[in-house]
Amino acid sequence: MLLDAVILVLREVLEAAFLLCVMLVFGQVLALRSRWVGLGLLLAAVGVALYAGGMQGITDALEGAGQEVLNAALQMTVFLLLMPVLALGVIAARRMRQCGRVLPGLMAAAVGLALVRESAEILIYVRAFSAVDEYRLGVYAGSALGLGIGASAGVLAWSALRALRPARAFPVCLGLLAVIGAGMVMQAALLLEQVDWLPAQPPLWDSSWLLSEQSLLGQLLFAVLGYEATPGPVQVALYVGSLGLAALSIWLGYRIGGRANDTL
């Protein structure tokens, strides 16, 4: 139980921590004030409280599919918020302005909702297994370890991105945000498949021989990039389409921003 708790909590924390660290560097490169971080954390705290308070009703909604559908909706919403973040970030960089309060507000909303989704998963897990006496200590200890490792990995990722020159950090952040967003769409599709809101289909390939989803690395790649060893056609189409939409958002940002006043 200790190892299971470490892996589950680490997987959830790592996804949120990775998104937050990329957003932090993204905002720093654009010289945004850091107040959006506090707003995002406040939104997350309110969202987690509401989720926890209504957990029973959420679980019972939609004939028992409420939790999966809500989590999928949160991930899809984060992805949709990332699209204007990419476009406005490029515009802000090329026109030497910060797009008012719109860009920081979108970044805060994306980070806040991502934290709500990941925190809710941890809360559900801890509540379920800590109610059993023989599991309680292992769940608490494993959760603390997973939280610490995930937070440390986020700090290391932030440090690595901060070490890059702005001219390199900016496109790297754009690419990472695009991939993280596509991974969230993949995860949302898997959740909807579990409750039959999307059709389950035969996999297009099986890469388990190369990297199993059950391995530690496989689970971490699933959390950050949406790795799936046996993806179906719908999942692949959604993943590729999400990357395409992200690329379109970035292209529109460069198109609207123009070629003059390029500061990066």
Image (cartoon, rainbow, N blue to C red):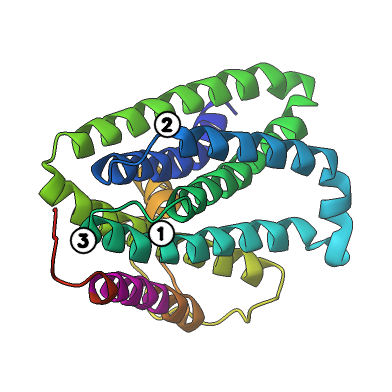
- The answer to whether residue 145 shows anywhere in this view is yes
Depth check: give the residue in front, 125 or 123: 123
- Disc nearer the start of the sequence (2/1): 1
- Would residue 204 be found to the left or right of residue 161 on screen? right
Q: Nearer the viewer, mark 2 or mark 1?
A: 1
The residue located at (58%, 62%) in the rendering is 77
Q: Is residue 63 above or below residue 123?
A: below
Kindly indicate whether the residue at mark 1 contacts the one at mark 2 (C-beta within 8 angstroms). no
Q: Which residue is mark 3?
A: 94
The residue located at (62%, 34%) in the rendering is 42
Q: Which segment is the magenta one?
A: 240-254
* Residue 180 on the magenta span: no
Q: Nearer the viewer, mark 1 or mark 3?
A: 3
Crowd band around label 2 with a 10 angstrom C-alpha radius: few (<14), some (14–19), many (20+): many
Distance (Cα) linking label 1 and label 3: 14 Å
Q: Which mark is residue 85?
A: 1
Distance (Cα) linking label 3 and label 2: 34 Å
* Mark 3 secondary-structure assignment: helix
* Mark 1 secondary-structure assignment: helix
Q: Which residue is mark 2?
A: 150
Which amino acid, by three-letter code, is at mark 3?
Arg
Crowd band around label 1 with a 10 angstrom C-alpha radius: few (<14), some (14–19), many (20+): many
